[in-house]
Amino acid sequence: MAKSASIKHVQQAMDGPEDVWAKDQYEYSAPVQASDFNLEYADKDKPNKRFVIFKLVNNRKKGRVHLAGEADLYNPASGKIERARLLLGVPSIWKNEQKDIPEQYVRENRRSITFENRIARIDVMDHQALEYVRRHNDFTENPHRRAGGKYDYFEWNPQRQEAEAYDREVFEMEMVQIAMNLPFDKVKKHALFLGVRFNDELGEPKTEKGIRRDYQIMAKRNPQRFKDTLDTREVEVHYLVRRALLNTQIDVNGRERGAAYWSDGGGRICKIPSGEINNALKYLTDLALTNSDEGRAFLEQLETRVK
């Protein structure tokens, strides 16, 4: 006796074969998880790691922030900016590699990255999400990013960040030590170049100790600039131009509007653009450092006239 068809079989016969595109064609990817508690750092050297943690740079962000799952990103394989989109179950994030995907599937399986109280936690097996967030323009460690992202974020790595903080602290201390041991003649020139004020808020001149203190603070706050400009030609020329201006050896915008002259009748130095009149110190310093005929002539006069 023939077996009667079930309701399920009848329904399949009427509707056609089940759409198995998403199940058979691609593997399912674990969804992005976000949390601000019970975090587990995913050290790249640990085989039992579970999550990779990303943090927003902005410490004041509260609640949830959603990073859209579609953007134009740099593709290192092609060397071009290409459209990337994050879809559940699709192994590639690059749109031109996502072949023959039904639009309905795209609509129903779009993904985004959610930061909960500044933190996004992504499963280490979720390779698509990890590639997407590391290629994104808002990822501060992306060497191909375009600056000015709306939600800048970084990959949380305590060991690396502790090492970087230690190296930064050591570098700051080294620059402060150099600042402490320099002879005061050098300190004065470099301190003036870095913007240290030689008078207090009441206009009274600071003592050597006061100037040294502020100079050391400057070395700690911006150790790289301190190092890059220490003992440079630019500092020496800046000091000479400043002395010439303070001693009224150079007349700016007095004898002739928009021009600098030697006050003792030594002749015209150069024309100064109207937008640079209030910043004559920098303009004249830059001029003396150029390799133009006018710049070389000014530097020679500067070194001869200013002591």
Image (cartoon, rainbow, N blue to C red):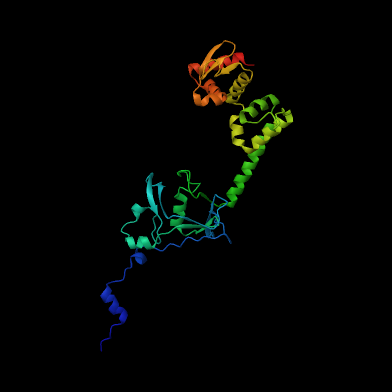
Is residue 282 at least partly visible in the picture? no
Does residue 238 lie above or below 31 as drawn?
above
Q: Position of residue 281 (x, y in %)?
A: 57, 24
Q: Quick one: quadrant of the N terminus? A: bottom left
The residue positioned 33% from the left and 65% from the top of the image is: 21
Q: Quick one: quadrant of the C terminus? A: top right
The residue positioned 67% from the left and 27% from the top of the image is: 187
Asked whether 251 or 59 is in front, the reply is 251
Q: Position of residue 60 (x, y in %)?
A: 57, 52
Which residue in the rendered view is the most extreme toward the top?
Answer: 265
Place residue 184 in its image quadrant.
top right
Does residue 18 lie above or below 209 as drawn?
below
Q: Position of residue 93 (x, y in %)?
A: 40, 54
User: How many discs mark residues in the rendered view?
Assistant: 0
The residue positioned 59% from the left and 35% from the top of the image is: 224
Q: Residue 105 vs residue 269: left or right?
A: left
Asked whether 135 or 112 is in front, the reply is 112
Place residue 194 in its image quadrant.
top right
Does residue 34 lie above or below 168 as drawn?
below
Q: Position of residue 237 (x, y in %)?
A: 59, 22
Q: Residue 248 vs residue 16: left or right?
A: right
Is residue 275 at least partly visible in the picture? yes
Asked whether 280 or 176 is in front, the reply is 280
